Amino acid sequence: AAPIEELERLDKAMGEGSAAAIGSRSVPGATIGSHQHRVRELLGRAGNVLIRRVAVPGIRDTQCGFKLFDGDRARTAFAASRLNGWGIDVEVLQHFRRADWPVAEVPVRWSHQSGSKVGPLDYGRVLAELARLKARSARPADLLAVLGFLVMAVVLYSGRLVGPGHRYLPDSLQDQNQWEWFFAVTADSVAHLRNPLFTDLQGFPDGVNLMANTVMLGLSVPFAPVTLAFGPAVSLSVCMTVGLAATAAAWYWLIVKRVVRHRGAAFVGASLAAFAPPMVSHANAHPNFVILFMIPLIVDRALRLCEGTRVRRDGIVLGLLTTYQIFLGEEPLLLAAIGMTLFAAAYGAANREAARAAWRPLLKGLLIAGAVCLPIVVFPLYWQFAGPQSYRSVLHGDNAGNSPLALLSFAERSLFAGDAQRANALSLNPTEQNAFYGWPLVLLAFGIVVRLWEQTLVKALAVTAVGAAVLSLGPKFRLPMTDTVYPGPWALLAHKPLFESVIEGRVAMICAPALGMLLAVALARLSTTRRVGTLYAGLLAVALALLPLVPAPLKAVDRAPVPEFIADGMWKSHVRDGESLVPVPLPDPGAAEALHWQTAAHLGFKLPGGYYNGPWGPDRIGIYGASPRYTSNLLRDVRYTGVVPAIGKNWRDQAGQDFAYWHAGVLVLAPQPNDGPLRKAVTALVGRPGKWTGGVWVWDLHEGS
C-alpha cells in the first residue's frame, strides 16, 4: 500500500531524533492514490478518533502498517505487549508515548490494495482490544475513586434501591411520581413511534409540552428499553444512582487533568462538587440537577479552545456536548454558563496576557459550537417555546433567593449537624436547599484563598464562588436579624429571557465545584509540606469543615399501594376510547399519586390535571399543573379544608361542563384525608352516590346517560 521508496522519509525522521517514524494517511502532505471502500474508510476514521481519545492522543493514523522503529526500543515495546490482534499497533505506540520516546508521524503515498485481511468483524475486535488497553492503563487510584463515588451514591439512595417500585422518597414531595411518569411516557412514545415532545396522557385534553418540561430526553430515550422491561421506578432509580456517581467521576477527571495531579486531593474535591448539600437536596427529586457529568466535559472543552491548538475540532465537539446537555437539562447548562463566565472574567482580569491569547480562539470556537448545536436543537427549541402548550415563563414568587444565613447553615440531610426545622425555614422546601455549605467550610475556603492568593487559579475560583453566592441571594435580600432589604445583583437578570424562569437560589450550586477545586488545590499543596504539624493542622481543618456536610442516606418510606381498581384493570370497563379517568381531586403538584396509578396501568388511560409546567391565561404564563377549572378548584379546596360548600344547580351545571371538557368517563375517589367530605361533594355534583369497587369510590358517568 505504501511503496518502499517512502522508507527514505521515515529514515530521515529517525535520523532527526525520533524513536519511531510511522507512515500516515492523515497528516498534511500525504497522498492517497486508490481509496478503500467508502464504508471501510469511514469506519477507519471513526476508529482513529476513538483510538486517539482512548490510547494515543495526537497520532492521527495508528493503523497504517508502514512503520519504522528503533530496534532496542521496539523489542522492549513488543515484549511488553499483551494483545494478539489488530490492536497491537496501538498498544506499541502507547508504550512509546508513555516512555516519552518521540514518535514522528510522516506523510506517505498510499494506495489501497486488494486482499485485505481486515474483515467486518475485526472492527468489533479492535474495539474490544481498545477496551482491554483502557482497562489495563487505568491507574488503581482512579478505579478506586470511581468505585468510591459509586459506593457513596448507593449509600445515599440505599433506602430506595431495594424494591424501587415499592419505595418512595418523601422529601421529593410529588417529584418522584412526576419523574417516573416522564420516563414512562418517553418510553411509551419510543415504543409506539410517537412524538416524544408532546403527549395528552396528562393534562387531558390540552396535553403537555414535554420539551418545555424537564423530561431529560438525553437519558429517558436511551433508557426506554430498561423502562419498558423493568418499569419507570427502576429506570429512574438506576439513572439517579449511576448518574450521581458519573458526575463525581467527571469532576474528578477534570480536577486531575486541569487543577491538581494528586489523586487524593482530586477525590476530596470531586466529592464536594458532586455530594455538596445542594446536590444532596436535589438528589431527592431532580435528576436534571444530579446527573451533570456533561458539565465537566463542557468546561474542559472550553479550556481547550482557549489553548487555540485545534479550534475547529474542539468547537465541533463543544457544540455536540452542548447539544446533548440541552436534552439533559437546560437550566443546569445556563448555571454552568454563569459559572464559566464568572471564572473567565476573573481569570482574565488576573492574567491579562492569558486573556489576550485566549479570546480569539475561544470566540471562534464558540461560534463553531453554536453553528453545530443550533441546527440540531432548533426544532426542539421551537417546539419548547412556540409549540402546543408552550408558555412564557414560570412564576416562582417575588424572591426565591437564598438567605445569607442559608450559606452558613447546615442542610437537613447533614448526618452530624442537620437541623430540619432551621433548614426548612431558610429554604423553599427540602428539594431546594440550594446553599447550606456551613460556616466551617466557608471559613476554610476563606483561609485557603488568603494563603494561596498569589495563584491566578485560586483568585478565579474565589471570585466564581463569591459571585455565585451573591447572585443566589436573589433580586432582593434582607439583612439577617433586621428589616433592612437591599436590591440584589440578580435583579439585573431576573426579567431577562431564560433567566426569568430560573430559581435564583439554585445559582449557589455553582459554588460546589468551585469550592471543591479550591479544596483540591489546598490539599495538593498541603501534601508537599515537610512540616508534620502543618500537615496535621491542615488535615484537621479540612476534616472539621467537611464532616458536618457528610449526608445521611435519603429518607425512604413504603409506597402507598395502587388501588385494585387500577392495578387489576377494573377501570377498563368504565373508560371508553377518547375518554379520561378523573381522580378526585384532580392530580396537581401537591398530590400527584394518580400519575403513579397511570404508570402502574401502563399508561392505559388519560388524566385531566397533573403535575407539569404548562400555560395559564391569555398571556400564557407558566404554572405548575393544568389550568384550573371551577370543579377542580372546588374538589381541591374540599381536599385541604374538609369543608363542603352548598352545591346547587349552578355548581352541578358547571361540573357537567367541566366533565364534558375533560371527556370524563369515570370519577375515582381513593381513601385519603377528608375523603368523607370529598365523597359528599362528588355525590352532590353528580346527583347520585358512588359505588365502592376495588378499594375506591367510583362514579361511572355513563350510568343514566
Image (tube, rainbow, N blue to C red):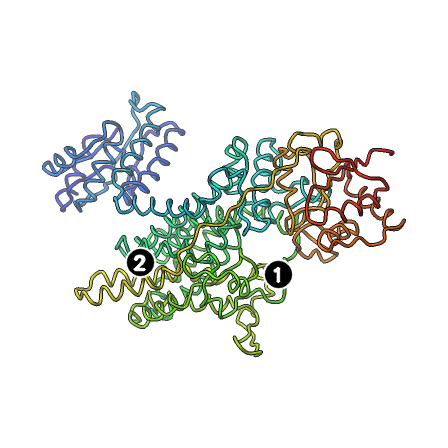
Q: Quadrant of residue 273?
A: bottom left
In which quadrant of the rendered image does the C terminus lie? top right
Mark 2: secondary structure: loop
For residue 276, above or below residue 43:
below
**Residue 439 percent coordinates (x, y):** 41, 68
For residue 494, above or below residue 703:
below
The foreground one among 644 and 455 is 644
**Residue 48 percent coordinates (x, y):** 33, 37
Label 2 and label 1: CA atoms lie apart by 37 Å
In which quadrant of the rendered image does the N terminus lie? top left
Q: Indicate left or right for 106 with 574 as reference.
A: left
N-term-proximal mark, 2 vs 1: 2
The foreground one among 601 and 248 is 601
The furthest residue to the left: 72
For residue 293, above or below residue 461:
above
Q: Residue flagged by tag 2: what amino acid is it? A: Val
Q: Residues within 10 Å of mark 2 (few under 14, many from 20)?
A: some
**Residue 598 percent coordinates (x, y):** 64, 37
Q: Which residue bears the numbered disc 1?
A: 396
Q: Residue at x 58, y 66 (%)?
A: 494
Q: Quadrant of residue 618?
A: bottom right
Mark 1: secondary structure: loop
- What numbered label is drawn on residue 259? 2
Q: Residue at x 17, y 66 (%)?
A: 531
The foreground one among 240 and 208 is 240
